Amino acid sequence: MDKEQRRRRATIAAIAPLAARHPDLPPSIAGLEDAAEALDALAAGMAPDRARVIAGALALDAFRWTTPSRDLLDAAAGLRIIATGGTLDLDEAGRARARQLAEAVRREGAP
């Protein structure tokens, strides 16, 4: 098994528990919840849970085609960077922006 296959298996294994935690929600809404929580962790200066980052990045990626919101695009880009192994070194302004993005994601996911 090559490195890419191992990475894919790890990603699938990381996402599976999230689907079990949110059985009553459509996958896209559950993913938005995960995205908001990952952004909250970034706003608090902590490293977000990898599974939440991946689920959130996937959900936001799906929403970016239907909702061309600048906030959702920024949130998707940030979570995609982390989901693919990158890091974000956020200063105070960056953490404040992460907080704003979490709120924007929550508004999008509100029924």
Image (cartoon, rainbow, N blue to C red):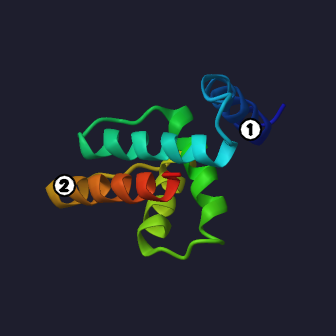
Residue most extreme to the right? 1
**Which dot marks residue 8?**
1
Q: Residue at x 59, y 40 (%)?
A: 30
Mark 1 residue type: Arg
For the N terminus, which image quadrant? top right
Q: Are marks 1 and 2 in contact (CB under 8 Å)?
A: no
Element type where label 1 sits in the image: helix
Element type where label 2 sits in the image: loop
Tell me where residue 57 appears, x and y as whole percent: 57, 51
Q: Is residue 81 visible?
A: yes
Q: Residue at x 31, y 54 (%)?
A: 98
Q: Residue at x 59, y 68 (%)?
A: 64
Tell me where residue 62 appears, x and y as whole percent: 66, 60
Q: Residue at x 42, y 51 (%)?
A: 106
Residue at image mark 2: 91
Tell me where residue 104 appears, x and y as whole percent: 39, 60
Given residues 47 and 66, the one toward you in this image is: 66
Q: Give the crowd class for mark 1: few <14, some 14-19, many >=20 residues within 10 Å.
A: few
Q: Give the vertical position of 24 relative to 36 (above or below).
A: above
Residue most extreme to the left? 92
Q: Give the vertical position of 55 relative to 100 (above or below).
A: above
